[in-house]
Amino acid sequence: MQKHFEKRLRLNNQIREPQVFVIDTDGKQLGVISTNEALRLANERGLDLVEVGPLAKPPIAKIIDYGKYMYQKEKRERGGKTSKTPGQEVKTVRVGFTTGNHDLLVRAKQADKFLKLGNRVRVEMPLRGREKSMSNIGREKMESFLKLITAPFTQEEPIKRAPFGLGLLISPEKHK
């Protein structure tokens, strides 16, 4: 597989061709003019002359703000990668085996907040050492924790053993 390395665009005095095909900031084609004349036009407007089509004969150059152009190009490339739409994210709330009642209330409020934002919530209870042999007590604690959550939710999966201990997944109730 051949790797593709993107070349950096040449701008302003880096352009070595005697003539370039110039495109204005509005997208209007100014035609083939000398590089010096194109640089003068760009400087008058306080912008850069950027070679966007180096392989064309003569090369294509645009009069644009280079920093803004690169920012928008990166934004377009990143565009499809991340989507932070509510309801798609899974938030985690960890409840300890020995967690007290007040701390359970705090975690329940946290879970309420996540559910109201439309996020799914994974409730985890890590079990260490002897706690693993007393998982039935952990299940009871998880069930009592679920009763403390005030936001309407549906339990997507039951309380089950996971590599770290116990876990379950809840999601906000869908309105009909």
Image (tube, grey):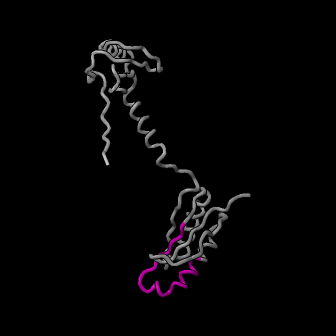
Q: Residue at x 57, y 64 (%)?
A: 111
Q: Position of residue 4 (x, y in %)?
A: 32, 42
Which image quarter holds the C terminus? Answer: bottom right
Q: Position of residue 96 (x, y in %)?
A: 48, 75
Q: Residue furthest front?
A: 1
Is 172 above or below relative to 32?
below
Q: Nearer the viewer, residue 119 or 110?
A: 119
Q: Position of residue 52 (x, y in %)?
A: 37, 27
Occupied quadrant, residue 62: top left
Q: Is residue 83 magenta?
A: no
Q: Position of residue 151 (x, y in %)?
A: 65, 63
Occupied quadrant, residue 117: bottom right
Q: Nearer the viewer, residue 55 or 108?
A: 55
Drawn side of residue 146 relative to residue 14, left or right: right
Q: Residue at x 54, y 67 (%)?
A: 122
Q: Residue at x 47, y 17 (%)?
A: 28
Q: Residue furthest right?
A: 176
Decide whether the magenta segment is chiefly helix, strand or loop: helix
The stretch in magenta equals: 122-142
Drawn side of residue 157 relative to residue 16, left or right: right
Is 13 above or below relative to 97?
above
Q: Is residue 124 magenta?
A: yes
Occupied quadrant, residue 9: top left
Task: Please tell me how many numbered marks the rendered image carries.
Answer: 0
Q: Residue at x 52, y 50 (%)?
A: 84
